[in-house]
Image (cartoon, grey):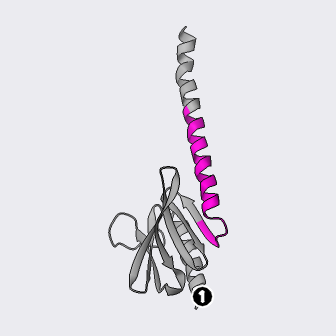
Amino acid sequence: MLHGLLWLPLIFIFFLLTALGWLERRRQNLFRNWANGSELCKLDSSGAAYLKDGKLIWSAFEAGEFKEKDSFIIKKLELIELMALTSGEAPLTNESQGKCRLRLVGSGREMDVPFSDADKAREWMDQLMQKARCDL
């Protein structure tokens, strides 16, 4: 009887991990369909984004689907800044790591795209600026 009670939490943890893995796989498959045909795309804990036909679209995963939050026309891009995610208007240094956001500025509007990894955000900065220059 005691051995059975010891295995009960392990069985519960197994089923919990299996369910969480299934949900993550479903999220990744939905993202793959959502970003199909994009030139550049990302999926992380902060949200999802893709660049298609010169338009950057950012969304969040809510209630089992990707809900569009905002979009930005890349050829109108004038400036990209790497900002801290929660500390207001503080720009990040090159050594900074962790959660951050890209601030896209152009045509009198600003858009913030959150990232869970600063290195990935820096890669996106370079690629978006290249795309903006090519579209001019």
Snapshot quadrant of residue 22 = top right
Q: Nearer the viewer, residue 102 or 26?
A: 26
Of all residues, the one furthest to the left in this rendering is 88
Q: Residues within 10 Å of mark 1 (few under 14, many from 20)?
A: few
Question: How many numbered badges does the structure rendering display?
Answer: 1
Quarter that holds the C terminus? bottom right
Residue at 62% in and 88% down: 134
Q: Residue furthest bottom?
A: 136
Return the x and y of residue 131 as percentages of the image width and height.
60, 82
Q: Residue at x 49, y 86 (%)?
A: 76
Q: Which residues are magenta?
A: 16-41
What residue sits 56% from the left and 60% below the top?
43
| Residue 58 position (above or below residue 136) | above
Residue 69: which quarter of the image? bottom left
Q: Residue at x 56, y 25 (%)?
A: 10
Along the line of sight, which residue is nearer the eye, 12 or 61? 61
Residue 1 image offset from top left, x and y in percent: 55, 7
Q: Can see residue 107?
A: yes
The amino acid marked with disc number 1 is: Asp
Secondary structure category for the residue under label 1: helix
Q: Which residue is mark 1?
A: 135
Quick check: is 37 in the magenta stretch?
A: yes
User: Residue 74 at what x, y percent from top left?
Assistant: 53, 81
> Is 59 left, or right, of 136 in this rendering?
left
Looking at this view, name the residue that lies furthest to the top.
1
Q: x%, y% of residue 2?
A: 53, 10
Report if residue 116 is visible in the image.
no
- Looking at the image, residue 118 lies above or below residue 53: above
Q: Main secondary structure of the magenta part?
A: helix
Would you say residue 86 sits in the magenta stretch? no
